[in-house]
Every structure is written in structure tokens, then in C-alpha cells.
Amino acid sequence: MEKRIFRHSVRVPYAHVDQMGFVYYANYFVYFEMARAELLREAGMPYTDMEKRGVMLPVVTANCEYKKPAHFDDLLNIETRCTAINGTRLRIEYVITRGDNVIVTGYTEHICMSSEGKVLRPVPELKKLIHGTDI
Amino acid sequence: MEKRIFRHSVRVPYAHVDQMGFVYYANYFVYFEMARAELLREAGMPYTDMEKRGVMLPVVTANCEYKKPAHFDDLLNIETRCTAINGTRLRIEYVITRGDNVIVTGYTEHICMSSEGKVLRPVPELKKLIHGTDI
Amino acid sequence: MEKRIFRHSVRVPYAHVDQMGFVYYANYFVYFEMARAELLREAGMPYTDMEKRGVMLPVVTANCEYKKPAHFDDLLNIETRCTAINGTRLRIEYVITRGDNVIVTGYTEHICMSSEGKVLRPVPELKKLIHGTDI
Amino acid sequence: MEKRIFRHSVRVPYAHVDQMGFVYYANYFVYFEMARAELLREAGMPYTDMEKRGVMLPVVTANCEYKKPAHFDDLLNIETRCTAINGTRLRIEYVITRGDNVIVTGYTEHICMSSEGKVLRPVPELKKLIHGTDI
């Protein structure tokens, strides 16, 4: 069964481009985070609300595969989908494109954690991100 | 009477250089902050200790004059000195050089604030940063 | 006569917020740059086109006054206007607001420079940014 | 046979810490890059020299596993080692520690590329990074 896909776009600022004229590799993780925030908002659970309820989503793994360079002022599209891994860990996958070109693919894995550092089961709103899948 | 001068150096990472091959203009404010942290440490008042005592130093003004570009892998020297402005506001001045060349000059102004947002008089350790000057 | 005002908005990413929960001070200069890029685009002179024509706009002065903190996920509005200073130097002013609150005000000053480092007079498209003003 | 290990350290600036009080996840990739630059320098092949010879090392894969959070002002140690994967691709591995605690582990994979975008075999200096290993 298909996972729900969320879409977000970002314009590359001059700040993010290196002297090769390419987006500096670490900045894609910032784009991942921006898209992740929109995914949570669309799921009815903005990250600010989660933090107010004492739930944090620290990253435990981050990965990016660089396919083609992106440049200053490019308008990049980010497709985001959420995949469960197990009872306490979430996996979110990203594909960044410019037109028909795939620029990078990547994923992040997160745990749900209380503000005291205790690992929690994902809140129900997060489960709704994954259609047809028990988490 | 002379102000005390503190010195710190930073190596420019690839992350900080734009497609002109120059350090991106906002990054100098990060170098200012790194030098400011060392200034506070040398004054016997690391910023982490200040925050533990409930004192924060938010920036109220920041300024930078760009004289010459800096490049990837440059070793930059930062001279920092603290100047009082009035009873609740601190001014810190920065000169960044590479060898004999001045790259940028700038300053930041800060207030001392409690974690509840109340404006405070500067802690005694900060006054010691300024030789021969009542604050 | 009124200067033309351009408007742009940015959503604050988690990446830009410090441990006080405030947007880190250097990041406002990135927002200034993003708004500046949109101003140039609306003026019919995207910065990528300028660079292709061999014209760069390095910053010679940057200034920011911090009025109120901004937070993660805030939607910030940036008003940008261009003011001539003299024949070779441009000044751009910024006001960043969240709702009715002014968060920061600031400005940047730029020279027009050829890719060989020669100072140029501003290109005609830039002059159009300033209504009723000879540059 | 043991790979050569290079060591570098970085002080965490305020700029890099998020509102959880943790180093923001993308910034570890900047630390990886800083350590990578020092590794190349110690190998007698500073990255600036490589670029002058027309050789670039764009990243094709980046990965990070987050074990424990790092905080503002922490002094982090970065151990870096280079491992060949095949004839045109390099893999560099990183371990970042604070005292006895492992903060993150990660790796990046790179290709050697000419400034025209042609994939190259690694330059001899890079091979020397790997003791007892043909590349």
C-alpha cells in the first residue's frame, strides 16, 4: 500500500552554495528538516505543538546520496514520506528534484523522546502519517 | 587608557565560502561569536557559566564592514575588545585580519538579560574586561 | 517620493534557532539575502543573470538592529527597499516583522564589481529599483 | 593492516546549537569537512592545492549516526581515516568524541572529478592516506 507523500519546495539562497557553485552538502539536511516540519504540520501535528506536549524527535541516523548538483536560486522540490521501522523509531525518506532531475535522495531516522530524555512510543498523529501501516 | 585585547583564530571551512570564492558575509558574525566566547572564557566567565547563573547576553546591534575577501582555508585572526556603552549595555569590537590585511571590522552590542527577560546590570566579571573603565 | 517596497516571507527552520529558543543573530543576514534576491528578480534582474553578465554585488557594510526575538516555525515578513548612496554604492534596507511586531531592522551596502574586481557603476536595472531617484 | 588515523578538534559555537541545547544534526557534516581538510593537509595535499590542480572531491554519499548529544562550548575530537572503496571513489570515516563518549560516527564517500566534471582516478597523495592498501 502506498505511503502518503508530502511536497514542499525551497529556493536555494546564496548562503548555501560553495565555491564549486554547488549547494554545500550539509545544507540538504536543512532542506530535509524544512520538509519534515511541513510534513508534521500537514499531519496535524506541528513540531512546535509536539515540543509543547514534551515530545521531541531527535535524529538518530541521517543519510544523503548526492546525484546531481543544485545551484544558487534553483527551485527545489522535496518529496517526503514517513515509514515506520519499529515501535519507537520513525524513518522519513526524502527525494529532492529540480524539474525532472533527481538532485539527492536521503532519509532520517528519529526516536520520540520526552524532554527528560525518556524514549516514548510515537504519538498517534505520527502513526497517521503512514497509511495502512501499524507502527 | 588601553582596552584589553583578546586574540583568537579560525580556519575558514569550505562550508563558509560562496560561489565568488569569498567567505559569505553572514559567517563573519559566527566568527565574532566564537571570539566573543573566548573573550568571556579568558575573563573568567565562560558563557555557559553565565547561562547557568541565569544571565544571557542577547545581541541588540550587529555591524560589519567588509574590507577584503577571505577565502577557503584562510587562517584568520580575530582581535576582540570590550567597551562599555552605559549601565546595561555592552559593546564588543572585532578586527579580523589575515597576515597584515584587515578583512573585516565590526561590533556587537549586548544587553544582560535574566532568563525571564529582565534587563540586568552587567555582572562584575564583565566589568573586568574593561581596564580602567567604570561601567 | 516613496521608494518601492518589495515583500518576501520566510519560515524559520529549526536549523536557525539557538538554545535560547531565538533565531541566531547571524541568520537574519541570510534572510536579508533571500529578500534581496527576490527584490532583484522582481526588478527584472535576477542575481544569476547579473553574475552571467559579469557583475557581482559584494557587501561592503551590513547592519542589524534586534528588536524582538523570532522563534522556530515563525512566519516572518521581510520588507525590502533600495536606496542609492552614491554613484557606485547601493544601500538596501530591510524590516522583518511577525504580525504587527518588528523583529529586526537592518541594511546592507553593496558595490557593483566586475568579475576581475573592478568597481562598476550600477547597471540600469538596479536604478529602476529606486523611484524618482537618480543614482 | 591499520589505517592511518588523523585527529582534529573543534569547539562548538553557539551558532551550531538548537533549542534542545544540542548541536543541530547537519552541523556534524561541517565538522566532518573541517577534519577532512586537515586530513588532506597532513597528507601533503591541501584541498586548495587540489583545486588549483583542477581536482575536486565532491561528496556522493554522507551518513551520520547520532549516539549522544553535544552542547555549546564542548570541545569535540574528530578521528578521521580514509578507506578505499574502488578505483574512483574514496571513503572517509569519522568518529567524534567528547572525552570518553562517542557523540557521532559517520562517513562520506567522494569521487575525484576534474573541473570539467570528468571522473578521475585518485591522485597519488590520496593513495598515501591508506597504508598498505592499493586503491
Image (cartoon, coloured by chain):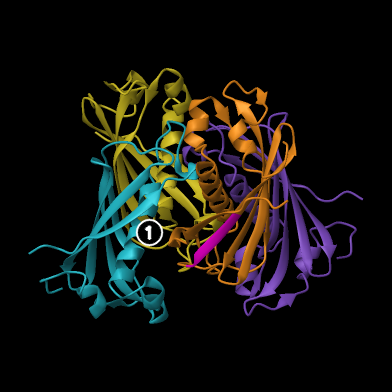
Chain colours: A purple, B cyan, C yellow, D orange
Q: Where are the magenta residues, as a range?
A: D74-79
Residue closer to the observer: A37 or C58:
C58
Q: Position of residue D49 (x, y in %)?
A: 48, 32
Indicate whether residue D78 is drawn in magenta: yes
Residue C122's place in the image compared with C11, above or below, is above
- The residue depicted at 37 percent of the width and 71 percent of the height is B47
Q: Which residue is mark 1?
A: B34
Residue B22 falls in which quadrant of the image? Answer: top left
Q: Position of residue B25 (x, y in %)?
A: 37, 42
Residue C129's place in the image compared with C81, above or below, is above
Residue A103 in sight: no
- For disc 1, the neighbor class at 10 Å (few under 14, some 14 to 19, many from 20) is many
Disc 1 marks a residue whose amino acid type is Met
Query: In which quadrant will I find the N terminus of chain B?
Result: bottom left
Residue D23 in sight: yes
Majority secondary structure in the magenta region = strand
Query: In which quadrant will I find the C terminus of chain B?
Result: bottom left
